[in-house]
């Protein structure tokens, strides 16, 4: 006896595949769990598999329909909408990956550069950070000191201190501070702040932009 075809199962698979293809095409599929959304995988046959992060069970058609509604709620044309919050999350994640690939120090490596003990370096880092003169970033239970702000001797670049102070005093996200200082900034017409500040004619403009950014935080 042939098993009866379940149209609901077929509709669920079609909806899951359509959602998966859409998100994969946007390059957003891998960022779903970080946004608190269901996990998307592909089975050995290439079929989309959606898993509820709470129950770890396959998503139902109703659940997938709700996911689609949430993702398409931005914009006046839902069928063409892009999940803005997910795009923003993906962009932040990509920026973090780029920043982590750049030069940074931990206490041990910075101590070597400074020719000091790890304990003395840790104390100095915390003291400078507490006075808003050094950018320190927490990542996966590690403390990172981005290298762009340091001299060859491991000390804070003096020309950067006035720029760091308003940004850090505003309690802006350290990742945002790191990204703004090391990437082309709209407030500076595309100049990179940590480089532009080396030019005496641009230093005041960089400081003004930093203050404005801090005020908008």
Image (cartoon, grey):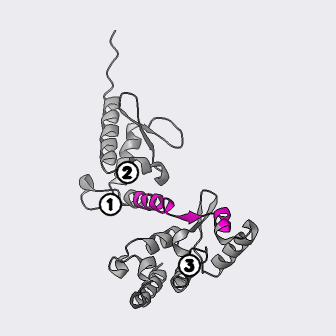
Residue depicted at x 43% and y 51%: 31
Disc nearest the viewer among 1 and 3: 3
Q: Tell me the element at label 2.
A: loop
Return the residue at label 1.
74
Q: Nearer the viewer, residue 130 or 26?
A: 130
Residue 142 screen position, x and y as percent: 63, 59
- Is residue 207 inside the magenta stretch? no
Residue depicted at x 61% and y 77%: 155
Q: Tell me the element at label 1.
A: loop
Residue 195 screen position, x and y as percent: 43, 78
| Mark nearer the N terminus (3 vs 2) | 2
Local crowd size for mark 3, using a 10 Å CA cut-off: few (<14), some (14–19), many (≥20) = many
Q: Is residue 121 above or below residue 200?
A: above
Q: Are marks 2 and 1 in contact (CB under 8 Å)?
A: no
| Mark nearer the N terminus (1 vs 3) | 1
Local crowd size for mark 1, using a 10 Å CA cut-off: few (<14), some (14–19), many (≥20) = some
Q: Classify residue 152 by image quadrant.
A: bottom right
* Region in magenta: 89-112
Q: Nearer the viewer, residue 91 or 67?
A: 91
Return the residue at label 3.
168
Q: Which mark is residue 28?
A: 2
| Mark nearer the N terminus (2 vs 1) | 2
Q: Tell me the element at label 3.
A: helix
Q: Are marks 3 and 2 in contact (CB under 8 Å)?
A: no
Q: State the predominant SS element of the stretch in magenta.
A: helix
Residue 119 screen position, x and y as percent: 75, 68
Q: Nearer the viewer, residue 127 or 21?
A: 127
- Is residue 90 inside the magenta stretch? yes
Distance in Å between CA atoms under marks 1 and 3: 33 Å
């Amino acid at each position: 006896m042939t098993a009866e075809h379940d149209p609901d199962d077929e509709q669920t698979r079609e909806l899951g595949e359509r959602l998966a293809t859409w998100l994969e095409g946007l390059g957003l599929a891998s960022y779903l769990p970080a946004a608190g959304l269901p996990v998307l995988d592909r089975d050995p046959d290439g079929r989309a598999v959606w898993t509820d992060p709470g129950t770890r069970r396959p998503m139902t058609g109703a659940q997938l329909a709700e996911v689609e509604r949430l993702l398409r709620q931005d914009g006046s044309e839902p069928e063409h909408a892009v999940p803005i919050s997910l795009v923003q999350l993906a962009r932040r994640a990509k920026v973090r990956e780029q920043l982590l690939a750049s030069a940074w120090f931990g206490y041990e490596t910075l101590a070597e550069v400074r020719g000091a003990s790890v304990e003395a370096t840790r104390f100095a880092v915390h003291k400078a950070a507490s006075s808003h003169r050094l950018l320190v970033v927490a990542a996966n239970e590690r403390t990172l000191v981005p290298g762009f702000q340091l001299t060859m001797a491991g000390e804070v670049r003096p020309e950067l201190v006035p720029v760091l102070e308003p940004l850090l005093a505003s309690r802006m996200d350290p990742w945002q501070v790191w990204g703004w200082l090391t990437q082309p900034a709209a407030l500076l017409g595309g100049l990179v702040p940590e480089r532009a500040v080396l030019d005496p004619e641009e230093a005041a403009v960089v400081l003004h932009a930093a203050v404005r950014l801090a005020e908008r935080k």
